[in-house]
Image (cartoon, rainbow, N blue to C red):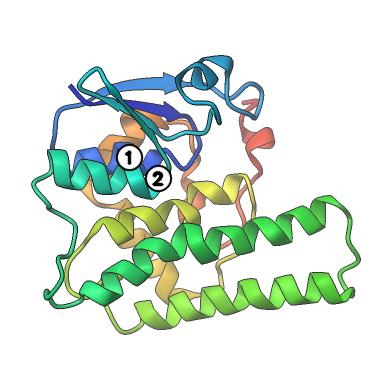
């Protein structure tokens, strides 16, 4: 049995969501933040303590979102939701699969660190980080104005990877998406999928619905109290 360790309100939601899209059996283990970082039991599973962490067959423990997604798609999903070389949209699939954690998420985190450090908004470093983040969102919005799903006509693991960054991550790094109509339409399509609703009910029922809208949602610390 595949075991999925999910740190609530984190990027490990991708793995739970993926399993639901694939319709495969898995054992879900939920972990709470302590108070915002990973709890000790995740460090017992992996030296970095960073979710997602999956276990399989009694002798495999694997971390890193893309690694977990690729492993599950091929080992448990029969290659579904993963484009193959030679298939239409293969290069687009690869690009957007890695875009979330390779470009978009680091860019958002960079700007958030500058804000936390109270960097002056008119400083060169802040303006550069803000310009880059806006460029990433425009790039994504332009793509979604041309296609229904990131790899083209079919929903794939690339969509699973990117959705977290546009929704739940906004409770940790609040930002406004109101100016990006194509991204918002895409978020609506994804979040209304039955598999996504099953993931949310099982793993993150407390995440507010406002993460699917345009305005920046409340920070995790604010809504977690209620």
Q: What element carries label 1?
A: helix
User: Residues at badges 1 and 2 in contact (C-beta under 8 Å)?
Assistant: yes
Q: For residue 53, which quarter of the picture?
A: top left
Residue identifier under label 1: 15
Q: Position of residue 201 (x, y in %)?
A: 33, 31
Q: What element carries label 2?
A: helix
The answer to which of marks 1 and 2 sits earlier in the sequence is: 1
Kindly identify the residue that appears in the image at 50 percent across and 16 percent down: 44
Q: Can the viewer see residue 60 in this picture?
A: yes
**In terms of depth relative to the viewer, which is nearer, 73 or 193?**
73
Q: For residue 215, which quarter of the picture?
A: bottom right
**In terms of depth relative to the viewer, which is nearer, 209 or 173?**
173
Q: Where is residue 125 in the image (x, y as percent from the top left)?
A: 82, 71
Residue identifier under label 2: 65
Q: In this view, does 176 lie to the left or right of 97?
A: right
Kindly identify the residue that appears in the image at 52 percent across and 80 percent down: 138
Q: Where is residue 166 in the image (x, y as percent from the top left)?
A: 48, 58
Q: Quadrant of the N terminus?
A: top left
Kindly identify the residue that appears in the image at 32 percent across and 53 percent down: 160
Q: Is 110 located above or below residue 225 in the figure?
A: below
Q: Can the viewer see residue 175 in this picture?
A: no
Label 1 to label 2: alpha-carbon separation? 7 Å
Kindly identify the residue that appears in the image at 81 percent across and 50 percent down: 116
């Amino acid at each position: 049995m595949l075991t999925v360790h999910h740190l609530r309100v984190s990027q490990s939601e991708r793995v739970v969501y993926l399993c639901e899209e694939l319709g495969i059996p898995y054992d879900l283990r939920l972990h709470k933040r302590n108070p915002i970082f990973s709890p000790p039991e995740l460090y017992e599973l992996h030296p970095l303590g960073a979710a997602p962490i999956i276990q399989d067959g009694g002798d495999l423990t694997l971390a890193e979102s893309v690694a977990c997604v690729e492993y599950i798609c091929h080992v448990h999903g029969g290659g579904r939701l993963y484009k193959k070389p030679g298939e239409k949209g293969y290069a687009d699939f690869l690009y957007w699969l890695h875009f979330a954690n390779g470009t978009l998420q680091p860019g958002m985190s960079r700007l958030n660190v500058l804000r936390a450090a109270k960097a002056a908004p008119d400083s060169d470093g802040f303006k550069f980080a803000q310009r880059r983040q806006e460029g990433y969102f425009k790039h994504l919005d332009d793509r979604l104005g041309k296609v229904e799903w990131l790899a083209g006509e079919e929903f794939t693991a690339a969509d699973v990877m990117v959705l977290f960054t546009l929704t739940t991550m906004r409770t940790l790094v609040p930002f406004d998406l109101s100016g990006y109509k194509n991204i918002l339409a895409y978020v609506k399509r994804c979040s209304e999928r039955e598999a996504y609703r099953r993931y949310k009910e099982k793993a993150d029922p407390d995440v507010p619905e406002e993460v699917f809208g345009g305005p920046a949602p409340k920070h995790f610390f604010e809504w977690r109290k209620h």
